[in-house]
Image: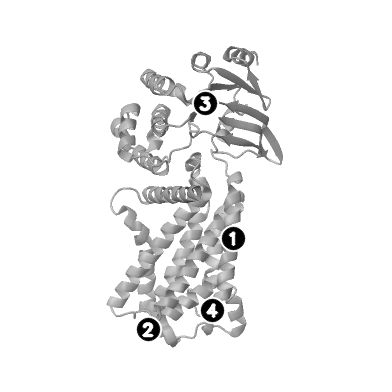
């Protein structure tokens, strides 16, 4: 019991150290430094939000465009960053695996924590600014929104674990990632709502756990103004399955990593 | 005590498999100093990495009943793009050391001065070795794994190692890979030779050196 507690503490310390290291290698110590963790996704969201607000009508399908873009983009950026940072993550951190207490799982957890944190803070900043400027309203049902974000975070972690391990085993995967992240955009649920597409496509979209969590987030933001489609049970078991597959691959991946 | 039991290591080469280590067994007790000799590419560094937990054996097992350092070698252990200080911070965090004490010790031992603030990739191999030794000595392992790297240091660094590692910490175990026979004779009390994927344990350092030179 005591040793379990101690090893959990050790792993938390390792993840903390990896987080600091990640911030320093990616953003350096100069000028804004770690603020870019938030700045990078924030710039993206602000840009897209302004563009859509400018070129689209103020409401689409009765939904205000600015809020629609922000609630879609934040989870999408979170997922994309998690998956992209997962590719070849072990190789990039190979020299750290010289230390026995650093494991592939710690490396991925540190990266996912950083990306999730960046996306959430960026989302809060951009949404806060939009609300203050009158382009967006406060969420109608915050609880549902938190639940959607929670599922999206678990989904991101599962995908990052799987992609990180597979990219270590197969070099070809890396080449497919660009096309994959682009082509999967419709299945993220970020740019459309399930209710807007014809019924035969709805079923296809609802295969993606991300679409369910996005529907929850939209439901949380717009309340009764939209009709949302999601299945908590389906999202729970698909996310749990992704995490299980991801964990099992990550724990096996150590054998495939050749440390210089 | 560290015990390797029937350790096998294979690498995939093209379509085939190359067996670098074939059922290697050895045991190192507290305070023992083992020299591992062998031609280039014989598998010495691979064995050290497996003992240090950096690489996993294909088969067999490693039992560690004392703390083992990471392999002090030319590569690894540091992030090149980060400064020596950031690497020091990282290692203090994961080994739960006090940053200020560690920094004071490293400053004194490695004598890197202001270069500690520069990225590690700009260091010479001698400077990297100094940083690696300073940090691993600060951590106080029971067993140190040294892969060649001690030879790249200058006279002064060698004297500091002599003092801090071989004298003050004479009770620690060492596993050393080296081609410097004088150094091996001076420091080690046991010898082993890796040849044709097999490990041959010798009765004395002298007989290990003799076997190695006859290869």
Determine the chain carrying the residue at label 3.
B
Determine the chain carrying the residue at label 2.
A
**What residue is pinned by disc 1?**
A244
Of the two numbered discs 4 and 2 in the rendering, the one whose residue sits closer to the viewer: 4
Q: Is residue A197 above or below residue A178?
A: below
**What residue is pinned by disc 3?**
B30
Distance in Å between CA atoms under marks 1 and 3: 41 Å
Distance in Å between CA atoms under marks 3 and 2: 75 Å
Q: Position of residue A114 (x, y in %)?
A: 41, 57
**What residue is pinned by disc 2?**
A58
Secondary structure found at label 1 = helix
Contact between labelled residues 4 and 3, with CB atoms less than 8 Å apart: no
Q: Residues within 10 Å of mark 3 (few under 14, many from 20)?
A: some
Both labels 3 and 4 in a single chain: no
**What residue is pinned by disc 4?**
A230
Contact between labelled residues 1 and 4, with CB atoms less than 8 Å apart: no
Of the two numbered discs 3 and 4 in the rendering, the one whose residue sits closer to the viewer: 3
Residue B175 in sight: yes
Q: Position of residue B109 (x, y in %)?
A: 34, 27
Secondary structure found at label 3 = loop
Of the two numbered discs 3 and 2 in the rendering, the one whose residue sits closer to the viewer: 3
Determine the chain carrying the residue at label 1.
A
Distance in Å between CA atoms under marks 4 and 2: 26 Å
């Amino acid at each position: 019991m005591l040793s379990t507690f101690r090893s959990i503490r050790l792993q938390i310390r390792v993840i903390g150290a990896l987080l600091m290291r990640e911030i320093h290698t990616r953003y350096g110590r100069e000028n804004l430094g770690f603020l870019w963790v938030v700045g990078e996704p924030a710039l993206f969201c602000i840009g897209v939000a302004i563009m859509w607000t400018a070129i689209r009508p103020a409401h689409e399908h009765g939904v205000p465009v600015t809020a629609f873009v922000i609630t879609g983009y934040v989870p999408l950026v979170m997922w994309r960053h998690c998956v992209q940072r997962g590719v070849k993550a072990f190789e990039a951190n190979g020299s750290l695996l010289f230390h026995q207490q650093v494991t592939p799982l710690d490396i991925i957890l540190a990266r996912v924590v950083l990306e999730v944190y960046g996306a959430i803070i960026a989302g809060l900043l951009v949404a806060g600014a939009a609300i203050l400027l009158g382009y967006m309203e406060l969420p109608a049902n915050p609880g549902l929104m938190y639940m959607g974000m929670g599922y999206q975070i678990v989904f991101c972690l599962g995908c990052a674990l799987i992609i990180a391990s597979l990219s270590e085993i197969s070099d070809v995967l890396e080449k497919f990632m660009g096309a994959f992240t682009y082509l999967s955009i419709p299945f993220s649920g970020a740019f459309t709502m399930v209710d807007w597409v014809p019924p035969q496509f709805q079923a296809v979209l609802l295969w993606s756990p991300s679409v369910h969590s996005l529907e929850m987030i939209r439901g949380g933001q717009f309340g009764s103004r939209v009709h949302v489609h999601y299945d908590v049970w389906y999202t729970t078991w698909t996310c749990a399955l992704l995490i299980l597959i991801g964990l099992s691959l990550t724990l096996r991946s150590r054998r495939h990593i050749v440390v210089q | 005590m560290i015990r390797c039991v029937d350790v096998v290591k294979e690498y995939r080469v093209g379509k085939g498999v190359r067996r670098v280590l074939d059922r290697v067994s050895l045991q190192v007790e507290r305070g023992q100093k083992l020299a591992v000799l062998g031609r280039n590419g014989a598998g010495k560094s691979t064995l050290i990495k497996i003992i240090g937990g950096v690489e996993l054996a294909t088969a067999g097992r490693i039992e560690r009943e004392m703390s083992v350092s990471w392999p002090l070698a030319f590569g690894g252990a540091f992030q090149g793009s980060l400064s020596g200080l950031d690497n020091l911070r990282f290692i203090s965090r994961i080994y739960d050391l006090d940053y200020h004490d560690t920094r004071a010790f490293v400053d004194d031992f490695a004598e890197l001065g202001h270069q500690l603030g520069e990225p590690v990739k700009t260091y010479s191999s001698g400077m990297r070795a100094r940083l690696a030794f300073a940090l691993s000595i600060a951590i106080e392992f029971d067993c140190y794994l040294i892969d060649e790297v001690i030879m790249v240091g200058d006279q002064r660094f060698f004297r500091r190692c002599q003092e801090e590692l071989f004298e003050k910490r004479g009770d620690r175990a060492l596993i050393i890979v080296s081609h410097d026979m004088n150094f091996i004779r001076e420091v080690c009390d046991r010898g082993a030779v890796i040849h044709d994927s097999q490990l041959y344990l010798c009765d004395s350092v002298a007989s290990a050196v003799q076997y190695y030179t006859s290869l």
